[in-house]
Image: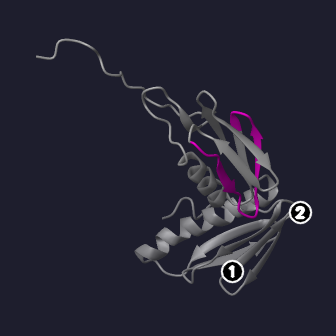
Amino acid sequence: MSRVGNRLINIPDGVSLENKENQLMVKGPNGNLMVGLCDMVSVNIEDKLMNLTRNSEDKVSKSMHGTTRQLIFNAIEGVTRGFSKHLEIIGVGFNVKAQNNRLTFQLGFSHDIVFDLPDGIEAVAQKTSLEIKGADKQLVGQVAAKIRSLKKPEPYKGKGIRYKDEYVRSKQGKTVGGGE
């Protein structure tokens, strides 16, 4: 029994849902998102509530029941409130600048790194902090992970790009001493 799949989804005001051939179009104030539906799950919309039921009791249907429900819930949440990830840039001389749909990083390399943002993603940059915002939860997380991979935090001095609340365990450096 899927506990997540059995939960009802409240559809807020200003959000419209349109079911077309294995695709659910979610429209809201922050944009439009498409959610792919599998054949194993049926979507029922009554008043302002949505319920998902599975068509069979095999293992794949049970797993897709909760997954599909959560994907639809995230799409509704994204077009109403949106999602965001906060990044910090730590290091002497490390910074970021935002211009139009492009981020320019200075991360201690001999050249600046230019990162083009995909459609549907906004970035708010302030010298050493960066906020990635958008309606699609998966895309926001993916862009934040790509930006973090430009210069991962290193364990000796802690320099690099990290998530705001991320803990980077620091290591002790080399020690000078008798090594015979």
Q: Is residue 154 above or below residue 51?
A: above
Check the image and report above or below for 110 versus 12. Answer: above
Q: Quick check: 64 left or right of 83?
A: left
Q: Which mark is residue 23?
A: 1
Comparing 57 with 32, the one in front is: 32
Q: Of residues 178 and 39, which is closer to you in this image?
A: 178
| Residue tagged 2 | 14
What x and y, as percent, mark residue 97? 75, 42
Q: Which residues are magenta?
A: 110-129
Asked if residue 84 can be seen in this view, the reply is: no
Q: Residue at x 50, y 41 (%)?
A: 152
Q: Is residue 127 magenta?
A: yes
The residue under the point 79% across, 63% down is 11
Q: Secondary structure at mark 2?
A: loop
Which residue ends up furthest to the front in the rendered image?
Answer: 110
Position of residue 45 in the picture relative to residue 63 (left or right): right
**Which residue shows up at 70% across the image and 35% down it?**
129
Say which amino acid is labelled 2. Gly
> Picture coordinates of residue 7 (x, y %)?
63, 60
Asked if the magenta segment contains residue 91, the reply would be no
Which percent across, then down, holds residue 158? 50, 29
Crowd class of label 1 (few under 14; some 14 to 19; many from 20; radius 10 Å): few
Residue type at mark 1 is Gln
- How many neighbours does mark 2 have within 10 angstroms: few (below 14), some (14-19), or many (20 or more)? few
